[in-house]
């Protein structure tokens, strides 16, 4: 399935930013490709930039990578719950609280990238396991309707969004 086949009724306006950032791609294929592109991109960033903040109170590159990892986990969990027809409304999360409570800046960049790869590959297997019916299921997360397949595209767009932020504000 490609992004342009995803009805706008399956995601919120907030998440539309990430859907657009994903581009018109095949979800399963791009979940893997964009991970490898991101890792190559990050490995080419000068070492002195990983702890850099472009302004007071802004996240470092390591913070952002940890944020991407945390978001992958949360959205993978949401996809699993919704795909299994769990009707429970799933709570949002406060991303700043998550970043404030990690030790990302004390971690090695290769360990962060290895963890991101492991979590993404886990989500890739999860999305490959879904039937067409499961991908179309809609649940409630962060007080808005969202489909399982929209979550897959959001994961891609979220990662691409932050890669663009690296390029524009950190490098």
Image (tube, grey):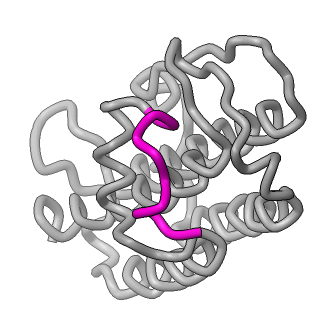
What quarter of the picture does the N terminus occupy?
A: bottom right
Q: Which quadrant of the structure image shows residue 33?
A: bottom right
Q: Position of residue 145 (x, y in %)?
A: 55, 24
Q: Residue at x 81, y 49 (%)?
A: 133
Q: Residue at x 80, y 16 (%)?
A: 87
Q: Position of residue 48 (x, y in %)?
A: 27, 71
In this view of the protein, which residue sits in the foreground, 143 or 42?
A: 143
The range drawn in magenta is 1-11
In this view of the protein, which residue sits in the foreground, 108 or 87?
A: 87
Q: Residue at x 52, y 28 (%)?
A: 98
Q: Which quadrant of the structure image shows residue 101?
A: top right
- Left or right: residue 71 versus residue 45 is right
- Left or right: residue 73 versus residue 70 is right
In this view of the protein, which residue sits in the foreground, 4 or 69?
A: 4
Q: Position of residue 111 (x, y in %)?
A: 64, 67
Q: Position of residue 171 (x, y in %)?
A: 15, 72
Residue 167 on the magenta span: no
Q: How many marks?
A: 0
Instruction: Note whether 35 is above or below 160 in the view shown.
Output: below
Instruction: Note whether 65 is above or below 151 in the view shown.
Output: below
Q: Residue at x 67, y 17 (%)?
A: 90
In this view of the protein, which residue sits in the foreground, 43 or 26?
A: 26
């Amino acid at each position: 399935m490609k992004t342009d086949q995803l009805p706008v009724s399956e995601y919120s306006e907030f998440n539309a930013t990430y859907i657009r950032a994903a581009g018109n791609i095949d979800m399963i294929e791009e979940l893997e490709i964009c991970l490898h592109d991101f890792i190559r991109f990050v490995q080419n960033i000068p070492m002195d930039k990983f702890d850099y903040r472009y302004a007071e109170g802004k996240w470092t590159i390591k913070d952002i990578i940890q944020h991407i990892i945390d978001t992958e986990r949360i959205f993978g969990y949401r996809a699993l719950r919704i795909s299994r027809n769990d009707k429970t409304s799933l709570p949002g999360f406060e991303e700043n609280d998550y970043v404030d409570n990690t030790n990302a800046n004390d971690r090695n960049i290769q360990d962060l990238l290895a963890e991101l790869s492991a979590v993404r590959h886990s989500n890739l297997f999860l999305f490959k396991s879904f039937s067409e019916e499961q991908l179309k299921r809609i649940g409630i997360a962060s007080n808005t309707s969202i489909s399982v397949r929209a979550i897959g595209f959001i994961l891609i767009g979220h990662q691409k969004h932050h890669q663009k932020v690296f390029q524009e504000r950190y490098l």
